[in-house]
Image (cartoon, rainbow, N blue to C red):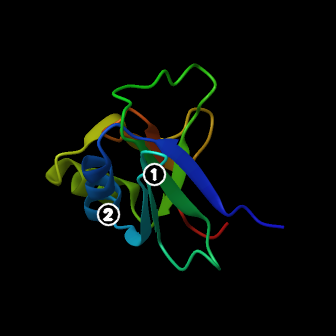
Amino acid sequence: MRIMHTMLRVVDLEQAKSFYRDTLGMQLLNEWEFPEGRFTLAFLGYGDARENSVLELTWNWDTNSYDKGNAYGHIAIGVPDVYAACEQIRRAGGTIVREAGPMKGGDKVLAFARDPDGYLIELLEDVAD
């Protein structure tokens, strides 16, 4: 068994794809429109979906907002340098909501960004322990 993908509902598919592709460096792997269902699915990731977990962005054509509730946490992305990743996101017009630095009570370096739909993205130092 493996985790295949994580799905997020988005209000503006082009803006969301731009954030994950241009700001976070993911590749657009597939995109399908379903006119009868009035939705579009876009799959993005850092590698082939047969070998890696990917992100599914779902755009329901007739929905202008979503209630995210209070159960959602974040998506974590491993980066070699959290400080540099924050600067890259800022240069691309993204929002950092927790500056890079050690986690409370630990020494792992992390930061948080917010995507265009308000979902949190954890940037986590991806180093071998």
Q: Which mark is residue 21?
A: 2
Q: State the image coordinates of residue 35 (x, y, percent, origin top left).
A: 41, 52
Q: Is residue 122 above or below residue 18?
A: above
Q: State the image coordinates of residue 108 (x, y, percent, origin top left).
A: 56, 50
Q: State the image coordinates of residue 22 (x, y, percent, origin top left).
A: 25, 63
Residue positioned 51% across, 55% down in the render: 56
Quadrant of image for the N terminus = bottom right
Q: Which mark is residue 57?
A: 1
> In the picture provided, is 101 more to the left or to the right than 70?
left
Name the kind of residue labelled 1 in the image: Leu
Q: State the image coordinates of residue 89 (x, y, percent, origin top left).
A: 26, 52
SS type, badge 1: strand
Instruction: Sort mark 1 into few (<14), some (14-19) or many (20+) by Cα contacts within 10 Å.
Output: many
Residue 50 falls in image quadrant:
bottom right
Q: Nearer the viewer, residue 46 or 55?
A: 55
Name the kind of residue labelled 2 in the image: Arg
Q: CA distance from mark 1 to mark 2?
A: 12 Å
Residue 108 visible somewhere in the drawing: no
Q: Residue furthest right?
A: 1
SS type, badge 2: helix
Residue 115 visible somewhere in the drawing: yes
Residue positioned 56% across, 48% down in the render: 7
> In the picture provided, is 100 more to the left or to the right than 51?
left
Q: Is residue 65 above or below residue 12?
A: above
Q: Which mark is residue 68?
A: none
Quadrant of image for the C terminus = bottom right
Answer with mark 1 or mark 2, whichever residue precedes in sequence.
2
Residue positioned 50% across, 44% down in the render: 8
Q: Nearer the viewer, residue 34 or 113?
A: 34
Residue positioned 36% across, 40% down in the render: 61
Instruction: Sort mark 2 into few (<14), some (14-19) or many (20+) by Cα contacts within 10 Å.
Output: some
